[in-house]
Image (cartoon, helix red, strand yellow):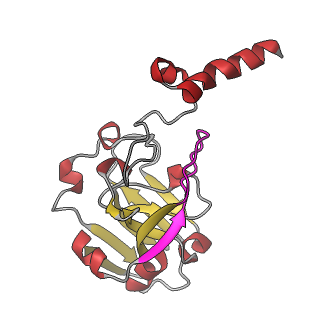
Amino acid sequence: MGLGSLALLLTTVGQSLGGALRPTAVLAPHGRLPGEGADGFPVNTTAAYAGVTEADTGPDWRLTVRGEGREVVLTRRELLDLPQHRSALPIACVEGWSTRNLDWEGVRLADLAALVGAHGPPGVLVESAQTSGSFASAALRDNQVADPRSLLALRVDGADLTIDHGYPARVIVPACPGVHNTKWVTRLSFGAV
């Protein structure tokens, strides 16, 4: 019991005290530490670590939405021109940390499903520009897509997403682990799951 308590102390002291001990916090966010402003919440996987470059997120970025035999390709500007909705949701990481509720803004997943004639709406396969790591795609169930709080987020806390938080677009879904809130989204395939 004493050895277990000592191990727990050693793995959490860096998160509690910070500074030079921060690297010992094995359960804390490790990609980027919290900062100030709209992107002041943790990042486990940075764009650079995920292999996401300016070419993946720059002016030529497009979102492909598929479903019911239809396909629509949208620019970020076209997404911003669609009805925008807000959701106050946290990010809860499987590594043991979470954020406060953040003010996300974007297009409802259900609205994007309707755009390609997907009724119900069905589940969706979300694909990312991410080239490395286990979470370059995620499958969301029909009830997750139908929830009016589920968004393809373009902004957070009143500002555009930063690249490390998924710019130009990321998914945010209630009660869904952070790893399934896919960043750098390039394709939504409704009915593919």
- Residue at the spot 22% in from the left edge and 62% down from the top edge: 61
Q: Please name whichever residue, 186 or 177, is drawn nearer the observer in this view of the structure.
A: 177
Determine which quarter of the picture holds residue 152. bottom left
Q: Residue at x 33, y 58 (%)?
A: 161
Q: In which quadrant will I find the N terminus? A: top right
Image-quadrant location for residue 67: bottom left
Residue plotted at (33% across, 82% down): 82
- Left/right placement of residue 16 relative to residue 39 reads right
**Is residue 26 in sight in this rendering?**
no
Left/right of residue 106 with respect to residue 123 in the rendered view? left
Give above or below for 90 relative to 7.
below
Residue 99 appears in view? yes
Vertical comparison of 129 with 32: above or below: below
Predominant secondary structure, magenta span: loop
Residue 32 location, x and y as percent?
40, 37
What is the x, y in percent for residue 35? 39, 42
In the image: residue 16, left or right of residue 5: left
Please state if 26 lies on the left or on the right of 158 as rendered.
right
Name, please, the residue furthest toward the right: 1
Magenta segment: 85-101
Q: Does residue 156 show up magenta in the picture?
A: no
At horizontal 54% and vertical 73% (from top left) the residue drawn is 149
- Residue sitting nearer the eye, 132 or 179: 179
Residue 88 painted magenta: yes
Q: x, y percentage for residue 142?
A: 58, 73
47 shown above or below 85: above
**Rendering coords of residue 74 (x, y %):** 26, 74
